[in-house]
Amino acid sequence: MQYVSKRNTNGVISKGGSSLIYNRGAGPEQNFIETLPTEMSVKIFSELDVKSLCHASLTCKHWNAIIETDEHLWRSHCLSVLNICRREVDGDRQNGLSWKVTLVRNYQKGCVKKRWLKGRYSNIRSADELPSNNMCPLDVETWGEILEAELER
């Protein structure tokens, strides 16, 4: 049996992991997620990194709808990948793909390219030493950039 305080003055009661907002004496209205204005939710979500944003989209249908449809949330993260994968991002945007789809298509590629350019794999002696879960196909120009960076080291 769950204990509920009789002296709850703020109108919020936690029940089964979700908070319900009560009109004093009028019964439950809706949960706090639905009472928060969409603009405020977007502002909060804009502070999250990509991984946290994806986790938040799994929280509930309401958050998922906000996160999936707000292009601004994905645009800012995609622009950080743009510095690394300019050709790919520009090509996807010219083909009419959304910011989210563009980010999904290029995020891993951007991370791999960034690690290569920073010298993360400089001391690798054979292909067997490369972490397979962190690799992805890269285009010829990207390999050229990586080769130039390696030659400079």
Image (cartoon, rainbow, N blue to C red):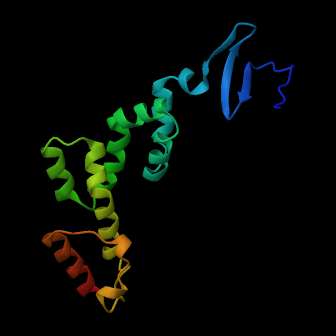
Between 147 and 35, the residue placed more toward the observer is 35
User: At which x and y percent is residue 52?
Assistant: 49, 49
Residue 145 appears left or right of 20: left
User: At which x and y percent is residue 66?
Assistant: 42, 31
Looking at the rendered image, the quarter that the C terminus falls into is bottom left
User: At which x and y percent is residue 38?
Assistant: 46, 25
State the residue lying farthest toward the front: 1
Q: Quadrant of residue 21?
A: top right
In this rendering, is residue 117 above or below 67?
Answer: below
Q: Residue at x 50, y 22 (%)?
A: 37
State the residue lying farthest toward the bottom: 125
Between 60 and 70, the residue placed more toward the observer is 60
In this rendering, is residue 7 above or below 113?
Answer: above
Q: Residue at x 22, y 69 (%)?
A: 137
Q: Residue at x 51, y 37 (%)?
A: 44
User: At which x and y percent is residue 118?
Assistant: 35, 75
Between 93 and 12, the residue placed more toward the observer is 12
Q: Quadrant of residue 99?
A: top left
Looking at the rendered image, the quarter that the N terminus falls into is top right
Q: Quadrant of residue 33?
A: top right
Q: Give the tally of numbered discs.
A: 0
Q: Residue at x 19, y 75 (%)?
A: 143
In this rendering, is residue 32 above or below 142?
Answer: above
